[in-house]
Structures are given as structure tokens and as C-alpha cells.
Amino acid sequence: MPDSAPAAPFTAPTLPDFASRLVRWQRQHGRHDLPWPVRDPYRVWLSEIMLQQTQVATVIDYYARFTALFPTVQALAAAPEDAVLAAWSGLGYYQRARNLHRCAQIVVQTHGGAFPQTAESLAALPGIGPSTASAIAAFCFDERAAILDGNVQRVLCRSHGIDDPVPATATTRKLWSLARSLLPEAQDMAAYTQGLMDLGATVCRPRQPACTECPFATDCRAHLAGDPQRLPVRKAARKSRPQRSTVMLWLRNSPDGLCWLEKRPQLGLWPGLWSLPQFDATEQALQFAAQIGPVIGQRELAPFRHAFTHFELTVRPLLVDVQAQPRAAEPQGQWLALEQAAQLGLPAPVRSLLLQQVPPADAPPPAVLHK
């Protein structure tokens, strides 16, 4: 059962032959060039986790690199967490990568390296929600299990004229009930599930839907009403994100150019990733730098913003060159060449910052650092 509370059956009329029409459309017009095989539980699971909050075009390259590094669930389970985070670096939402690693370890240690074959069992694994569990079970094991990601919510709301606000709990339960009522027979589950995803991604888009290409163009309630973009109705937008700021210290050892990176604690911002040290104020950052060695140059770089789910962070980079003997690695940090740093799990803004070609801190500043 996708949600814990029971849902009343969807009683409004459904579109006739919804599943068979969608399956026919998918086989003729769906996306058949995606790189993940739909019968391989490991590959399907990996792609579904990557696609959460991320567009297909972005995921494809990451998926190729990730599967080259970790071609099996056993390889992923055996990898150090730092290696997994490094491979994930840039995709964001790093809790997905940690759950991915833990899930792989459980599959290997508890299930003998084979993924469970029911949506209910899959949903008990770390990081696998109800819709992802159903997708794996439908694709790989032909289970009649309904999915309900954002694309599917949009398709169902528009096609069946559901104008209750999303993601209100009552609306979600109604959509789960509708999704289950529309399922085809088991032999069509893979094509049907992929069809829902394809239709939402390529035709029933959030903006400028291509209604004339839709298999439900003749009876889609939102299309017939003349304003498909009105659905789904969204709950009132939340207030703007709270604003935070941090000084990010790019501490660089002269003349070899090594930079000091620290592993973030498991709680707080970017947990478990490697990052430049962060401080509340410039004075604190300079005091830290002076403890490392004589400061031979410093410069404030152009600030930039990075949006998180619940707040927006303004980063004020401070480049400080020091003259010091690189000390041995410590539990919380170490000196690294940029090439070494690039192999670690770095937050996307830190990686972007370190890739900048920045002259010594006592040189004239460039006109623009960040576009």
C-alpha cells in the first residue's frame, strides 16, 4: 500500500481504455533510447533514485559514470562512502547517495545481492519511497503496482479533471486510488509505467503541453476545458526561503597551491562531504589562516548564492595564501592538490569555486569571478 492511511475508491468516471491507449502510445511514441535497461533491478533502482528532483538530460552522464565505477550492487555496497559521494558530486540532494549506499549494503548482506521482488518489500529499503518501489516492481517483476511521481500526478489531474490542491494529503490519497484503478494486466505493466513517465515528461509538460500529441486529447478534461496548464492546482506558495550567509575560506599553501579541505560533520550543511572551511565572519577565517602559517596574501572573491530546499545561502569566498609546511592529514581535514580534491565528494558550489583559475591572492583581482 503506497500510503499508510486507507484511501476511498476513486468514484468519478475514468477515461475509457486509459491503460490500453497509453500502452499503445508508449510503444509507438515513447522514449526508447534511455540508457537504463528496464528489467535490471539494480539499473532501474539507480536511475529512479537519480531521477528524483533531477532532469533526465542531467542524469544520463552521471548514470554512465556511476555504473562504470559501480557496475553491480555488490560493487556499490563494497565501495567507501567517500567514493560514492564523489561519484554523486554535482547531482545534489546528497542524502540520496547515502541512502543508495546503505540500500546496496542491505541488499547484499540481507538479501544475498538480489533485490526484493514486491513493492512492499522494496519500500522497506533505505531511500526507496512508495512510487520508486512500485516502479522497480512494475518494470522488473511485472507487479501491478501504481506509481505517483510529479509527472504522473500532472497527467492524472489533467486527464481526469482533478482540481483539488496538490500535494494536499486528501488529494494525494485520491490520486493513489485513481492510479491503482487504472492499472493494466501484469504483462503490460512495464510499458504502462514507462508510458506514464514518458507522457508526463514529453507531452503533458508543466508548461506548453503538446496536447495534440496526447493519446487522451479527445477526452482529457483539462484539454477540453481549454486551459490544461491550470492543473494540477498547487497549494499556496510558501514564503520565500530564509537567507543565510557564510564565509568560505579557500586556504592555499604557497607556492605549491595545495588547498585545505575539511570533512563536514554528519549533521548540518553538506553532511559528510569535503568542503572549504566555513566561518560566520571574515575575522574568524583570517584567525584560522594565521594559525596555519604566515599570511602572504588575501582577497575577497565575488559572493554567490546557492539555493537549498529550505533556505538560500550566500557564500562569501575568501582566498588566503599562506606560507606553511603542509601538515599531515588530520581526522577533520587535509592539504590536497586540486586534482586530488576533484576526486572527493564536494558540494557543487565548492567544486565550481575550486575549478576557477584564480591568481595569487596578492595579485590584482580579476574583473569577474562568477557569472
Image (cartoon, rainbow, N blue to C red):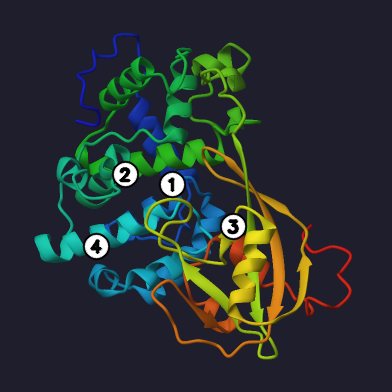
> In the picture provided, is 219 more to the left or to the right than 290?
left
Residue drawn 59% across and 28% down?
A: 211
Mark 1 = which residue?
52
From mark 3 to mark 4, how far is it between C-alphas? Answer: 36 Å
Residue drawn 10% across and 60% down?
A: 110
Q: Earlier in the sequence, mark 2 or mark 3?
A: 2
Q: Position of residue 87 (x, y in %)?
A: 45, 69
How would you rate the neighbour count of disc 3 (Cα within 10 Å): few for under 14, some for 14-19, many for 20 or more? some
Mark 2 = which residue?
132
Mark 3 = which residue?
279
Query: Which three-letter amino acid code belongs to the residue tagged 4?
Result: Ala
> Are the residues tagged 2 and 1 within 8 Å (C-beta)?
yes
From mark 4 to mark 2, how far is it between C-alphas? Answer: 15 Å
User: For residue 342, which numbered disc appears in the image?
Assistant: none
Query: Which three-letter amino acid code belongs to the residue tagged 1?
Result: Gln
Q: Secondary structure at mark 2?
A: helix
Q: Earlier in the sequence, mark 4 or mark 1?
A: 1
